[in-house]
Image: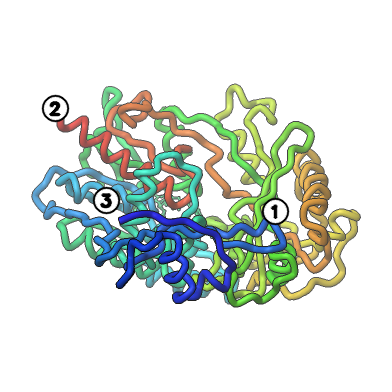
Amino acid sequence: MESISFQCSPEQAQDEQFIENKLRADSGIKYPKKIFYRWKKKSIDARGRNIKINCTFEVANNTLPSHLHDFNFLSVANAPSIIIIGAGPAGLFAALRCLELNLKPIIYERGKDVRARRHDLAKLNKEGILNPESNYCFGEGGAGTYSDGKLYTRSKKRGDVEKILQLLVHFGADDAILVDAHPHIGTNKLPQIIEVIREKIIECGGEIHFNSRLTDINIEQKQLNAIQINNESWKSTKNMILATGHSARDIFYLLHDRKIRIESKPFALGVRIEHQQSFIDKLQYHNRENDQYLPPASYSLVAQIDGKGVYSFCMCPGGIIAPCATSEQEVVTNGWSPSKRNNPYANSGIVVSIDPSDFKEYKTDPFVCLDFQKSIEKACWEAAGENQKVPAQGLADFIDRKKTVSFPKTSYFIGVTSVEMDTIFPAFVIERIRKACLEFEKKMPGFITNDAVIHAPESRTSSPVLIPRNPETFEHVDVDGIYPCAEGAGYAGGIVSAAIDGMRAVNAFFAKIEKE
Ligand SMILES: Cc1cc2nc3c(=O)[nH]c(=O)nc-3n(C[C@H](O)[C@H](O)[C@H](O)COP(=O)(O)OP(=O)(O)OC[C@H]3O[C@@H](n4cnc5c(N)ncnc54)[C@H](O)[C@@H]3O)c2cc1C
């Protein structure tokens, strides 16, 4: 088997006959009879007017061996157990790793299973009624379930990334995610994959308890001793993987109350901007609009403004802006898209890096960044009115400091209220976003228009709090048996890196019990 790479046009990349002829030609006369091949890597190069697809194929003169990994999940009903708090990507992939290492995972998840959760999301989107325990962030699959499912990560752990993608394919994702340079799954497909993962965990003897919130922790002599679920039942345990995500503020307060060290950490905050997808396609694909051979286009923007980074975050081509608050009296936005990315809108966070040292109490108060995040979400709720409406402003009006009188249709189902962003955000955030948009306009002419609508806020980009852990044992620096993990603890950002961190936490726990 060998690898053959070439560039071709988007049309040719979808033409089987062209590909076969090209592979035969490029490989000399090695495959005179039949040629066997499959995609290995695929990316788009849209820098020049002549858009190219970078293609790499695996080629052989016989049937290719399978490129899919085999996984050996053990029967763990009677194995040593470990408690996992949270069934997001970190918690679920931690549980899968337990099945490989002959450990029994016992998951407690505050939200509902994916199906029941869907009803709460429908109510939220139709009526603006928020369930604080079951929403876009809380429930089976965590914040990743009803997301775009972008699987691109900056993680350098290539082997780990490959394993997460292989596991997703094993549980039902399209194997194109192994090939695409920027793979994604889509909101319509993720819930089924999560369900199949859950079924496997239960079939192997693991446990998943929904509607089960961690409410207290008992520590004895710097060692975890017991945990409390739903303010009532206490469970003795010496070990717990804490994978509760960046929106579980109650966990940060609980740890602080129990004198378990937490620290403030940098995060990013700003707005979500929605353009017409056709405009982004035209711009990125040099006027090739609605092209059947190209996927909806994305963008990635960054500018340094007055010493701080301002950048696009979690861009969703063909996407929808979603209400992602987790408590009453706050408004939060994020974006998702279906697998085909076929909505007429393109949205992206435009965010500013926020550092604890931006606030004068940063040396003493671990909640400085969290408090700031909360204050912006509350200000948005107060400004927008009621029922999860969001404050909004036309992008051109924002640049001109004008209130917007009328909006184009936006994807945000619940509706928008016209608010000037300067009345919500402090100048050190909003002025930087304004200046950054002027820079972005130079890179993407037409970016600033009233056809683009700012929705506020984009505030849950990553955790504003760090739960410090020992880099080798993965245990909390002060308390044995607590394994702070993934996005909520400050060690991951995104689905894939959270899943990797969940698995690595289990590896660390396994190494400890092997030694004992
Ligand atoms: C709308 C949306 C779109 C997104 N799009 C993408 C994307 O395209 N690509 C990407 O990589 N990332 C995306 N993200 C971010 C991604 O979902 C997160 O980075 C990822 O889910 C973090 O995984 P996690 O397991 O660390 O935490 P989470 O996914 O937040 O999971 C934590 C889980 O813990 C549970 N929990 C919290 N507190 C408790 C408690 N006290 N007791 C019991 N359970 C508790 C929660 O209910 C939740 O299920 C998106 C997020 C949202 C909201």
Q: Are marks 3 and 1 in contact (CB under 8 Å)?
A: no
Q: CA distance from mark 2 to mark 3?
A: 21 Å
Mark drawn on residue 271:
1
In the rendered view, does 104 fall on the left or right side of 312? Answer: left
Is disc 1 placed on a helix, strand or loop?
A: strand
Earlier along the polypeptide chain: callout 3 or callout 1? 3
Across and down, in percent, residue 342 comes to 58, 75
Earlier along the polypeptide chain: callout 2 or callout 3? 3
What amino acid does circle 2 point to?
A: Glu
Q: CA distance from mark 2 to mark 1?
A: 49 Å
Name the residue at 30% across, 56% down.
1
Residue receiving disc 3: 95
What amino acid does circle 1 point to?
A: Val
Residue receiving disc 2: 516
In the rendered view, does 92 fall on the left or right side of 177? Answer: left
Is disc 3 placed on a helix, strand or loop?
A: helix
Across and down, in percent, residue 336 comes to 55, 64
Across and down, in percent, residue 420 comes to 82, 56
Name the foreground residue: 312 vs 509.
Answer: 312
Name the residue at 23% across, 50% down.
106
- Can residue 48 be seen in this snapshot? yes
Q: CA distance from mark 3 to mark 1?
A: 35 Å
Which quadrant holds the C terminus? Answer: top left
On screen, 187 above or below 5?
A: below
What amino acid does circle 3 point to?
A: Ala
Furthest residue toward left: 78
- Determine which quarter of the picture holds residue 261: top left
Across and down, in percent, residue 145 comes to 44, 62
Mark drawn on residue 315:
none
